[in-house]
Structure formats: structure tokens, C-alpha cells
Amino acid sequence: MKFNCVASATLWLAAWAVAGPAQQHDETLSRPKPLKHIPTFGLGTWLSEKSKVSDAVEYALTHGYNHIDAALIYGNEREVGKGITRSKVHRSDIWVTSKLWNADHRPDRVHEAIGKTISDLGVRYLDLYLMHWPVAFVPGGSGTELDNKTSILTTWRAMEDAVRAGLTRHIGISNFARADVEALLKEAKIKPYAHEFETHPYLQQQHFVDFHSDNGIKVIAYSPLANTNPTYDGNKPVAPIFEDPIWRDMAERKNCTVAQAVLGWGLQRGTVVIPKSVHKEYIKENLNARRVDFTEEEMQEIAAADKKVRFNDPGKGWGVRLFADLDDPTRLDGDEEVSEL
């Protein structure tokens, strides 16, 4: 039996509309138009504790933020949705991004996954839905058993159907190598709106950022504060960016915190930054990075200090060589050198 993606999505929405999520954000047929462009500053929710993320989201949305970055695999979308609801900010004034997990790459599962995300977040649509990794897992398998029968393009076609069904306004990608992006651009009927990947002062990848700009694809920088994420401790022999003499000096020059200086740099180079925090003081402090401005000479000084160090790379555990044509690619056991894609 041939699966009809649009019909499936419509049936899902009909069933969801009757039952409704636990906390559904109030919307009306007369709602104003949603945000036209992705806001350049957002709140990340990766590793945010369930017990704290609702308050963090609510606080952010009522104190100047209008962009929330979520994902099914984070395991906290229902709590994120509660924060959205409690903020009482109109849905059209919020940009909501989420992501498709690796075990849901098969077309029928794409629409089940986005339906669950929409329900858990308590919204009627997403602004942006990303393919979290260019890697497919077998559903119900070991958890990381590779699904070699489902291609990136097959998954992308189902995501395109999700746009047509009104489940998401835009679709995009995350953690792709350049060759993967180029291959997708050749076949996509709906071009990726954005690409979310790790980039910060220690992994600047300016050439890759420029490539996206040339192709009209927004860059969302996750881990914009580099190795301040606690899961990165000890991964690479690099001092925390908050202790870096260059960034301490920059912060002193700008009369701001190191975090504000680093985030301000990310904004000035044209990337969207999504720092994660569940602490009100840091959520508020981070947003003031929008006031930081660097001279051309300072931007060149920062560029020269690039360490080309990647902190988030699950490829070895999955047995997949990720980022093969980028700085600091995955190195699998037995590799002498990294081959091209």
C-alpha cells in the first residue's frame, strides 16, 4: 500500500485537534501573520532539565526573546510547550524550531514525529523543522543501528510534504557536511531554509558559513559559547572559552561579559545564535550581546585565533564519518587520515 504523506499528516492533525495537547497555546482563525524571518537570537533547550525549562522558556519569552530552539530527542518538548503557553505571548510572535530524530527518517515516521512534536509543544505548526543529523537509524532497533535503505533525499521529500500539509512553514538541516548540502540542493524541491551546526570562536568554519550565505541558507550556530557546555568537559585539550585571554580582553574592551562578547561576535558574523540557559540572570544577560559591536581589526584578530576544534561529534559511536569535508571531522578507529566523502 502506497503511503500518502499529506493525507497522513491531515489525519493526524484532525485527530490531534479533537483531543488537543495537554497545554494548547491559544490561537484563533484571525491570528496575525507569523514572523517573516528567523530571529537572530534564540533560547536553546538542549540538556535543559525538565523541572526548569518551562520557567526558562516563559521568562525568555516575556523578557525579549521570540525564538525557541527545541528537538524531540531532547526529551523536554512538553515542558518547553508549557513555557510557551504560560508566557501568553501570541503564537505568531514566536519562532519555534524543532528537529527530526534519526530513528524517524522513514517517510511515514516523519509525519508521526512532527505530529508528536507539534502536540507536545502545544502549537498548531512549527516555523522550522530540521533534519537533526544526516544519519538514519532503524526504527525500533538497537538505537543506533544504521538504516542504509533510507536516503537523505527520501526523508527530505517527506519533510517537503510536511510543508505542503501546513505542519511547518520551513524545513532545514543540521550537522551536514558540505557535500551533503550540495547534493541536497541539486534535488530539493523546497530548498533548506536554514542549517544548524556547531560554530563558535574555536570552530569558526568561516568558509562554510560563507557557503551558506552564497546559497541563501541561514546559519544557526549551536553551542555558540564553545566548550562551556558541561558535556564537553575533557573532550578536547582546550581551555574553557571564559578563561581565554583573548576573550577576556575583548570583554574588557567592550565593557561586557565574556559570554556577551562571544555571542555578539556570532551575531556580527551573520549567524543566528541559540545559547542555552535555565538561569534567569544568564538568559537576560545573554540577550544584551546584541549591543556588542566589533571593529574590523578586532574581527580579524578573532579570526586568527580559530582553533578548529569540534566538541560535538557522535560519529565514532555511530560508526559514521561525519563532517568529512569540514574542520575537525570524525575519526573512526583505524583511520590514518580522513578521506573525502
Image (tube, rainbow, N blue to C red):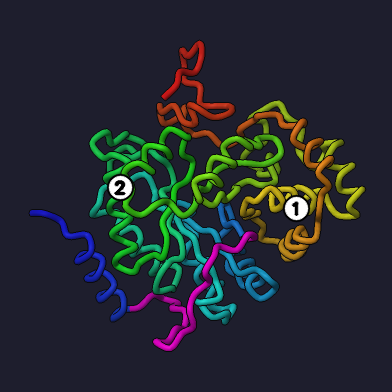
Q: Which mark is residue 137?
A: none
Q: Please give the name of the residue rendered at 38% of the width and 69% of the height, measured from the top-left corner.
A: 119
Q: Quadrant for the N terminus, please.
A: bottom left
Which is nearer the eye, 113 or 248? 248
Q: Mark 2 or 1 closer to N-term?
A: 2
Q: Please give the name of the residue rendered at 54% of the width and 40% of the height, measured from the top-left corner.
A: 211
| Side (left or right) of 147 relative to 44 | left
In the image, the segment drawn in magenta is 20-42
Q: Is residue 315 magenta?
A: no
Q: Is residue 78 above or below residue 306?
A: below
Q: Is residue 33 magenta?
A: yes
Tell me if residue 327 can be seen: yes
Tell me if residue 104 can be seen: no
Amino acid type of disc 1?
Gly
Q: Position of residue 93 (x, y in %)?
A: 56, 76
| Side (left or right) of 295 relative to 183 | right
Which is nearer the eye, 53 or 259? 259
Name the dominant secondary structure of the magenta segment: loop
Amino acid type of disc 2?
Thr
Q: Which residue is mark 2?
A: 155
Marks 2,1: beta carbons within 8 A: no
Q: Which residue is mark 1?
A: 264
Identify the secondary structure beneath mark 2. helix
